[in-house]
Amino acid sequence: DAKTTQPPSMDCAEGRAANLPCNHSTISGNEYVYWYRQIHSQGPQYIIHGLKNNETNEMASLIITEDRKSSTLILPHATLRDTAVYYCIDLQTGANNLFFGTGTRLTVIP
Amino acid sequence: KAGVTQTPRYLIKTRGQQVTLSCSPISGHRSVSWYQQTPGQGLQFLFEYFSETQRNKGNFPGRFSGRQFSNSRSEMNVSTLELGDSALYLCASSLFRVVGGAEAFFGQGTRLTVV
């Protein structure tokens, strides 16, 4: 079963920052937090991952709380093409697969 | 560089038939994983291959099988198809095994319809 909890849906105005929360209260010290997104009719796309520190790349920023029980994915300037289902995954130690939960359906509104 | 290529993109089969799906990973990637996506169950892990060996398997019946070749290309096979096997089948490749922080790159998927 998924160990992460995400809101089922969110809206964001185009050009504004989209902040997608994720709770992973049972995460262990050596488990990573991964974010993927799936645009309709396409395969999932890797966004970012982190362990303890905040991370940033060309797509997004990942903010992980100090206790690591939650994180927030930030899309700094959402565009219509960012409309997708966003999955937060905690990668279990020794696991060799990604467990996708139900994700958050983000709709970017013009 | 070329992404993950899955063939065919669409497939229609009849109950009881078998089907083989193909996945060509990104050049240099050695790990290939397969996932099934349905509206009711979401994305579910089928199995992972690394260096031609199945390393991990999800909770699917034995009708679902796969293999990986020396060039890392992978095939999955479903025998005795059932209506419930209708789904989008996704292949993901990664440089290393996913554990340890390697991101996975997904193909566009093969949409299988069983009638």
Image: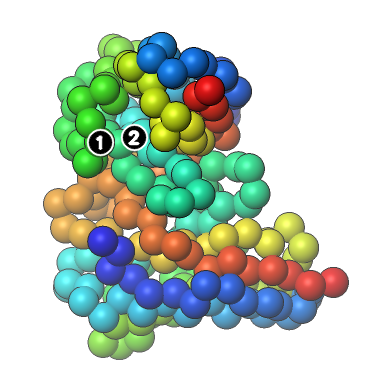
Query: Is residue B46 visible in this depiction of the protein?
Result: yes
Which is nearer the N-term, disc 1 or disc 2?
A: 2
Q: Residue A24, position in %: x, y?
A: 30, 76
Query: Do the CB atoms of the residues marked 1 and 2 lie less than 8 Å apart?
Result: no
- Residue B43 vs A4, above or below: the answer is above
Kind of residue at disc 1: Phe
The vertical placement of B50 against B104, above or below, is above
Q: Which residue is under mark 2?
A: B33
**On screen, B54 above or below B22?**
below
Going by the image, does A48 lie left or right of B31?
right
Q: Amino acid at mark 2?
A: Ser
Q: Chain of mark 1?
A: B
Residue A103 horizontal/vertical position (percent):
48, 65
Q: Is residue A3 above or below residue A100?
A: below
Tag 1: Cα neighbours inside 10 Å, few (<14), some, or many (≥20)? few
Specify the label residue B60 is tagged with: 1
> Is A92 displayed left or right of B78 in the figure?
left
**Of the two numbered discs 1 and 2 in the rendering, the one whose residue sits closer to the viewer:** 1
Secondary structure at badge 2 equals strand
Give me the residue at 26% from left, 87% from top.
Answer: A67
Q: Which chain is indicated by disc 2?
A: B
Residue name at image x 38 percent, y 21 percent: B81
Using the numbered discs, state the Cα–Cα distance from disc 1 to disc 2 in whole angstroms. 14 Å
